Amino acid sequence: MTIKLDRPDDRGRFGEFGGRYAPETLMPALEELEEAFAEAWADPGFRAEFSEILTTYIGRPTPLHPARRLSEELGVEVLLKREDLAHTGAHKINNAIGQGLLARRMGKPRVIAETGAGQHGVATATAAAYFGLECTVYMGEVDIERQALNVLRMEILGAEVVPVRTGAGTLKDAVSEAMRDWVRTVEDTHYVIGSVVGPHPFPWMVREFQRVIGEEVLAQMGEDLPDVVVACVGGGSNAMGIFHPLAERGIELVGIEAAGEGISTGRHGASIGAGTPGVLHGSATYLLQDEQGRVREAHSISAGLDYPGVGPEHAYFHQTGLARYESVTDEEALAGVELLARTEGIIPALESAHAVAWVARERASLAERRVLINLSGRGDKDVEEIGKRR
Amino acid sequence: MGRERLVTLFDRTRAEGRAALLPFLTAGLPDPESSPSLFQAMARAGADGFEVGIPYTDPLMDGPVIQQGSERAIDAGTSPDVALELVATITETTGRPVLVMTYANPILHRGVDEFTAAAAAAGADGVIVADLPVEESGPLRRAAERHGLGVVQFVAPTSSTARIEAVAASDPCFVYAVAEMGVTGEREEASTRLDGLVARIREVTDVPIVAGVGISNPEQAAAAGRVADGVIVGSALVRRVLEAPDPATAATVLERTVASFAAALR
C-alpha cells in the first residue's frame, strides 16, 4: 500500500493536514483555481507548453553534478541537483512559470506574490514579464534590507515591490499581506504563492509544478538511485519537488529546517522539529506558536527559511515517516556555504547551504552511502549577508 | 443566554422595523482595565449587541486599523484568556448579546469544545471565525451547539448560489454579508454590491443577515440597514480608540460616534 498521495482528498487534505482555512471572499477563487489547475494539468497541450518553456527558457533539465572534491573532503559520495543553474538562480522559477501559464489560461491579467529571500519574487516578476502580466510583490522590510539585490532585480523586471512593515517584517507577514491584497482583487488577480503552503489547491499545485526536479533525477539516475536525498525546508517546495517522485523507493528522504541560533534559544524556523499542529495561512500544518495559539516569529539567517510554518504535505510526510526532518544552525549553514564554495566552486544560497551543512555534520554516519543534495539556489543574493558574518 | 438571545434580538429589531447595530471592538483596547468602559459607552449610545475581537497575531481578514488594534491590545497584555474575562465583564455590565470574533488557530489550538465552553461560560452568545469557511466549520458548529452558542457564517459577493445554500444548510445564527471585497477597513464610497448580495441570500434562507466590512459612516450604515437585519461597524470605531489620547476620551468619542450610527438606523 502506498502512503504518499498523488493528490489530496476532496477536502484538500493530506491525512489530517492541509484543507482550506480561508476567508469566504477567497473560497470561490480557490474552487475556481482548483478546477482550472486540475483541468490544465490533465491537458496534454498545457503540459507540453510548460515543458517547452522549462527547456528553452529555464534551461531544464538542470545537471546532476558529482561533487568530487566535496566527496573527498567529507568521505561521503555527494551528488548535487543543480537547481541553482535554473534561470533566475533557483527552483522557484518552475512554479512561477507554471502558475503564470495558468493565470494566462484563466484570463487573469495581474499576478501578486510574496517573497522572503526574493527568489520567488524575482521568479514571479520574470514569469510576469514572460507572459505580459502586471506584477506586485510583497516583501517584509527586514528582508528588503538583507536581499537588496533581488529587490532591484524585481524592479528592473517591471514588478512593483511593496514593503511589509507589520509583524517582524519577514516572510510570514509578506504572505499575510499578499493574501489581504488577494481578498480585495481576487476577481482579476492570481496569487502566485511561492511554496507548498496556503489553502488547497496551492500545496498540491505547487508540488506538481516542482515535481519536475525529482522526475529529472529519476531519468538522470535510472536504476542507480541515491541512498539519501537531502533538501532544505522553509515552506518546502524544493524539498517536496524532489521528495514526492522519489518517495517509497527505498531512499531516505531528509528535510533540513533552520535551527537559527539554536533550537533551545527559541530563535529558529524549525516548524516540524519544534512546532505543534495548528493553522497558518490557510492550511492545517505544524507551526511555531505560543501556549495560547498565537503564531511566534521565526528566525533564520536565510530569509527563505525564516517562516514559522511548513507545507502541509511535509507535515504528512513527517507524520507517516515518508521523510524525516532535521535542522541546522545559522553558523553551520554559513560554514556550509564556504565548504561548497571552496571545494566545488559553487556559492550556494544560504537556504541550500543548510542541506550541505547537514551532510557535512553527519558525514560519519553517511560514509557508506550515496547522498544527493538538492541545491535549490545560488548564493549571489546572499554575498553581502555572508560578508557581514565572516 | 446563548443563541436564543440573538434570535430574540433580531425578532425585536425586525419588529421595530430597523436593523440592529452591532459595533465591533477589539477586547483589551486601549488596555484590558479600561476596555469594558468603552463597551459600556457604546451600550449607552444604542448598540444592540457587540462583536468582541480576541486580538490575534495574524489577522488575515483585517486591514491596517484592526491589525494595529490587535497589536496594541496584545502588547497591553490581552491574551485570549484575558479577552474572555473581558467578555464576561462586558456581557454582565451591558446586558447586550456578544459575539466573540477570532481566527481558526487559537480556537483549534485550545480545542473547539474547550473554547466554546469557555466562551459560553463568559456569557457570549455566538462565535465568528474569519478564516473558517463552512466546509471547515463542522467541529466548531457541533461544539457550539453543545454549549448553546450560535455560529456565524460569511457570504461574499463572489459566493456562488451553491455556497450560499451550503451556508444556509449549516444553520448559522446569522449570515455575515461581506459588503465589500477586501479586508476590513473604512471605505469612502458606499457598497454597490450589498443590495444584490442580500437579495441572493434572501432567496435561499430567512436567517438574519448582518452586513459588515467597509461600513464606516452613518450614511453607509443607513444604506446597509435598509436591506440587512443588522450592521457591523468596526474599523471606524477602532481607529477612534487608537487616536484617542486617553481611555476617557476614547469612551466619550465612541459614545458620540455609536450614537450617530444608531440614529442613522432608526
Image (cartoon, grey):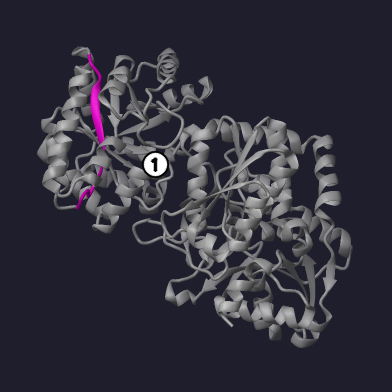
The chain to which mark 1 is attached is: B
In the image, residue B186 above or below residue A147: above
Q: Quadrant of residue B256?
A: top left
The residue that mark 1 highlights is B62
Magenta stretch? Answer: B18-31
Q: Amino acid at mark 1?
A: Asp
Residue B185 appears at what percent x and percent y?
Answer: 36, 36
Relative to B105, say whether A347 is above or below. Answer: below
Q: Position of residue A38 (x, y in %)?
A: 71, 36
Q: Residue at x 50, y 40 (%)?
A: A181
Q: Secondary structure at mark 1?
A: loop
Which residue is more in the foreground, B183 or A79?
B183
> Which is nearer the eye, A14 or A382?
A382
Q: The C terminus of chain B appears in which quarter of the rendering?
A: top left
Percent x, y for residue B52?
26, 40
Where, quadrant-wise, is the N terminus of chain B in this rendering?
top left
Give the residue at x 62% y 36%: A110
Q: Is residue B155 magenta?
A: no
